[in-house]
Amino acid sequence: MANLERLAETLTRIADSLDRLAPPPPPVTDMTQADAFVWHADPEWLEPVPVVNRVPLDLLRGIDRQIEVLTQNTRRFALGLPANNALLWGARGTGKSSLVKAVHAAIAEERPASRLALVEIHREDIPSLPRLLSRLRGCGRRCLLFCDDLSFDGHDTSYKSLKALLEGGLEGRPDSVLFYATSNRRHLLAREMVENEQSTALHAGEAVEEKVSLSDRFGLWLGFHNVDQATFLAIVQAYVNRHGLAIDDDTLRTEALQWATTRGSRSGRVAWQFIQDLAGRLGRRLD
């Protein structure tokens, strides 16, 4: 009997030690405490984002059609009507992710009762997408799921699970979840992936079709391209007006074009970087 008691005490101490070593369980997110969240796969947690880093919709220039189409699609989703998953593809810094966040803010302000939530998933956490969808399925809110800079390289096969979740699979995408992704690539996959598959496959056309079909799961494609000079200057001027920066028009034009030349491109991102430099030189803060 004494031996059994000592064994029980030993097992209890071991169990207590293991409990202390075990990581704490992931926190349970209250989906009513914010309108934006970031998904962390390890540990599984939806982190509330009280203030989203975004640009107002009226400051996005040169992408009027993209704004109109994505706003309409998002509005229909918020109303519970059919809407398409969207792929925003194109040149770097042309406003793809800014548009997603700005449209979410506009719809949330337009329809506060709809309580549309923006949930960001990082590219490296795509394999955990099924578990995230399980959480969002019963959260009681319509969720705009967003992945920025989505692409696949090398031997990465997680794109296959993404295909199934977008339009196939047994459960499929919940009606309360819409998926928006941005990418520099129209087909999300590196060119060499398609070429390698094409060179080794018995039926090259079928191999290419398998790769390209990932993008086909997005019902809405929106292309973004570097802007012309007039649009670039309009973006810069809009920022200057919004933040009340004191500079004459001729000087602004000259300095903005010089800045774009040194960067080798004209885009919304380059315009914002110029504005940050200008505000710093003028001793002004950007609120």
Image (cartoon, grey):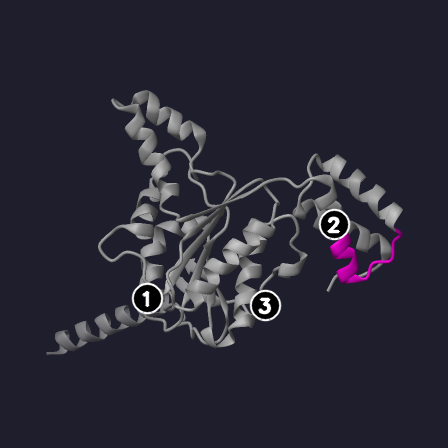
Could you tell me if residue 55 is visible in this image? Answer: no
- Give above or below for 90 relative to 135: above
Q: For residue 242: magenta?
A: yes
The image position of residue 24, as x and y in percent, is: 38, 68
Q: What residue sits right under mark 1 in the picture?
A: 137
Q: What residue sits right under mark 2 in the picture?
A: 234
CA distance for labels 1 and 3: 24 Å
Residue at point 44%, 63% (across, down): 76
Q: For residue 24: magenta?
A: no
Q: Nearer the viewer, mark 3 or mark 2?
A: 2
Q: Which residues are magenta?
A: 237-248
Q: Residues within 10 Å of mark 2 (few under 14, many from 20)?
A: some
| Element carrying mark 1 | helix
- Marked residue nearer the N-terminal end (1 or 3): 3
Q: Nearer the viewer, residue 287 or 216?
A: 216
Q: What residue sits right under mark 3 in the picture?
A: 51
The image position of residue 132, as x and y in percent, is: 36, 60
- Give above or below for 103 relative to 168: below
Q: Amino acid at mark 1?
A: Arg
Q: Nearer the viewer, residue 220 or 48?
A: 220
| Element carrying mark 2 | helix
Q: Amino acid at mark 2?
A: Ala
